[in-house]
Image (tube, coloured by chain):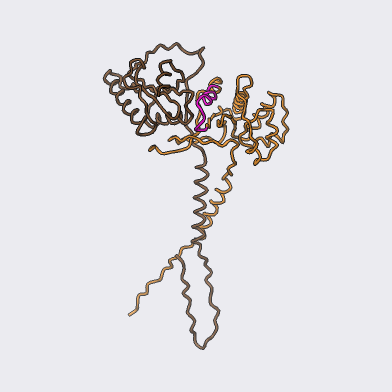
Chain colours: A orange, B brown
Amino acid sequence: MAKIKMKKKSTSTDMTAMCDVAFLLLTFFILTATAKVPEALPVDMPASVAITKLPDTDLAIITVGKGKVFFDIKGRELRKRTLEGMGAKYGIEFSEEDKTKFALMDDFGVPITGLKQIIDMKAADRTKANQPGIPLDSLDNQLKEWLLISRRATIDLDDKELQIAIKGDAKEEYPKIRKIMDILQDQKINSFNLVTGTRGKDF
Amino acid sequence: MAELNTGDGGGGKGGKVRSKKQNSKVDLTAMVDLAFLLITFFMLTTSLSKPQSMDLSLPNKDEDDKPVDNTKVDENRTMTVMLGADNKMVYYMGLLATPKVGPKDIAYGKDGIRRELLKQKKNVLAYSAAKGKPKNGIIVIIKPTKKSNYRNLVDILDEMAITGVETYAIVPEFTPEETKVIDKK
């Protein structure tokens, strides 16, 4: 009698294709990931249960901490346009190189007269520069100008309204936050975002 | 998964040296594992590094074009929360002269203000339903004092989101009586 021979199946699978796909995806994610730059004014944000994420572009972030106010705009073209506007407003000439550098920068907190100095610094030095914050008292309200000009630039560039987010330090006293909100409301910005950390509902 | 190399264990006749046939397959399992681990890491870090944010809409401040609004708010529906120094909070229902509840000290968190908010919300809904307007919910007036900090404000706004209170306002104005109450605590 003929014996029925069971064919021995190999247990190994061909992983080549899977490996290819995995590395393709890996390359994609590595290339799209952006390196995190240290902030010029680190703040400890309060936590909330909100899970809405901030947009990547057309966003201005006002950072409030240690009594100082810093300003940041997202979007390179928008930054360039805003710097041009501010230069024209305060009569300061910014070179093309300055503008390119400014577009790649992050938040800053200096009066407009000291901005050039900050732009010329290296990224690592900017965080150590001990920036004094943007002046916002009624005599010299530069934050207001920054906001106005960046909002105009957003409308020019993208035909969109600039979104404003306030990133406050948890220990910052309310009057300071109130002042920022007042400046925003003076420009009829009644709706804005508060940047927070996350936490569960169980606290 | 790993492949066992089951070549013949030698022992041929006459001790002939035969070159072993090498298996051309490489085991890719570990490599794929590593690749997927890194993919997961990069995927999560790119989307999680974006900060969360809370929407806040304030009423129009401009006084010139403000419509004259004489709507009387039923004091049975209002709850006033005053945020004081050192993470303290005082609340009362109704008017301060004739409060329905309070003024009482209360803590933040789920055993403090949240429980009270949920309780009062239910009471107000029952009250409104009895009056034939079941849609009128609780109105919370948040009064942050100069000594309160930003965390307090975010915390109380967060409680509004958690308890589902839809009508609330931030009013940083104090009557002398209210200042007395908050200073005493």
**Residue B151 x/y as whole percent:** 47, 31
Q: Position of residue A21 (x, y in %)?
A: 52, 54
Residue B155 is covered by the magenta coloring: no
Query: Could you say where residue A124 lies in the image, as x and y percent from the top left?
Result: 65, 41
Residue at (54% x, 35% y) in the render: A43
Q: Residue furthest front?
A: B184
Residue A32 drawn above or below residue A119: below
The picture quadrant where one finds residue A8 is bottom left
Magenta stretch: residue A178 in it? yes
Dominant secondary structure (helix, strand or loop) of the stretch shown in magenta: helix
Give, as a single range, the part of the protein colored magenta. Answer: A169-182
Image coords of residue A140 (percent x, y): 64, 21
The image shows residue A137, relative to residue B28, as above or below, that is above
- Determine the residue positioned at 51% across, 57% down: B34
Q: Which is more toward the observer, B179 or B155?
A: B179
State the residue at coordinates (55%, 30%): A64
